[in-house]
Image (cartoon, coloured by chain):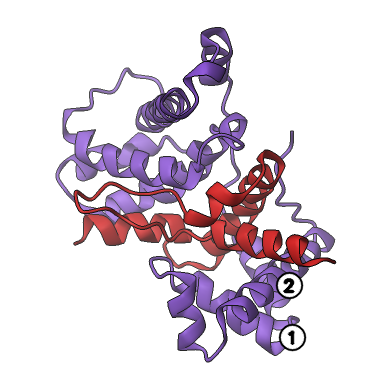
Chain colours: A red, B purple
Amino acid sequence: MNGDESHARNLIEQACSAWRQRDRDGSIQDHPAWHDLSAAQRVEVFDATVALRRIEAALDPWGLSSTGRAVMARIMQ
Amino acid sequence: MTDHDLHLERIAAGDPRAFAAWVAAAEPRVRLSLSSFAARVDTEVVVQETLLRIWQVAPRFAPDGRPDGLIRLAVRIARNLAVTEVRRRRPELVDDAMLDEHAAAPVPPVDPPDGALRAAVERCLEALPTKPRQAIQARIAGAVERDRVLAENIGMKLNTFVQNVRRARLALTACLRKHGFPLGVVR
């Protein structure tokens, strides 16, 4: 695997996270890593995220994925 | 099949526990409804924004008598947000007929998580080597933290953390497939 492939794999993995930054007015921002990916790699992020969120939800007592917990954290602020 | 509008009254009254129960059911369907936008829009942003908007509009929502009205509304909001985002970014590439087709695509049903999946996930997690297991558990527990912070918390460099998350994710999905839980997207 060359350096570019390894870098792309790291970006894909980061973009699968539910963490997203918010700007000053509270608007949620795209993951910075997502913008550096090709169309095919973005689809890979989507597919991996679908599987990850099911795994996360299966482990959570409320059935919430990391996305669900991020949203709940936001409304409880 | 459960009608998740059963939570509506309590959600409209501002009950976060009712909303959490609805989010658990709605989120996978909202996400899958965005499958055709995956290459053009950061769908995680759209899913989170949609769920937050539902929390805001629920008190004004009037059910139409058909099941899962609030989930159907969420899917409409999500697709509209995605279309708006595509138009904003690359208007020269947008064909209205194509976007209408994306917006009207059917939403596949999603099986709710069950005890068997949970048990399989726990078994597969146990089978992971230590570092990948630490990394994926930190990522799962730290929904609202950026990876750099999660990595620091468990004493890993960011690159090492991300590589361990990837190793864990691939091993977990392969293990779950072997246990009869293929979690991938059907295209």
Q: Is residue B13 left or right of residue A65?
A: left
Q: Position of residue B119 (x, y in %)?
A: 66, 70
> What residue is pinned by disc 1?
B129
Q: Residues within 10 Å of mark 1 (few under 14, many from 20)?
A: few
Q: Is residue B156 left or right of residue B88?
A: right
Image disc number at residue B169: none
B160 lies above or below A9: below
**In front: mark 1 or mark 2?**
2
Residue beneath the point at 21% across and 45% down: B10
Q: Write down the quadrant of residue B102 in the picture.
A: top right
Tell me the element at label 2.
helix
Residue beneath the point at 69% across and 89% down: B130
Q: Position of residue B145 (x, y in %)?
A: 40, 70
Q: Position of residue B76 (x, y in %)?
A: 41, 24
Q: Position of residue B171 (x, y in %)?
A: 77, 69
- Residues at marks 1 and 2, CA–CA distance in whole angstroms: 9 Å
Q: Is residue A63 visible?
A: no
Residue beneath the point at 67% across and 43% down: A38
Q: Is residue A69 visible?
A: yes
> What residue is pinned by disc 2?
B167
Quadrant in which the C terminus of chain B is drawn: top right
Whether discs 1 and 2 lie on one chain: the answer is: yes
Q: Is residue B39 left or right of residue B31?
A: right
B72 lies above or below A51: above
The chain holding disc 1 is: B
Q: Nearer the viewer, residue B116 or B159?
A: B159
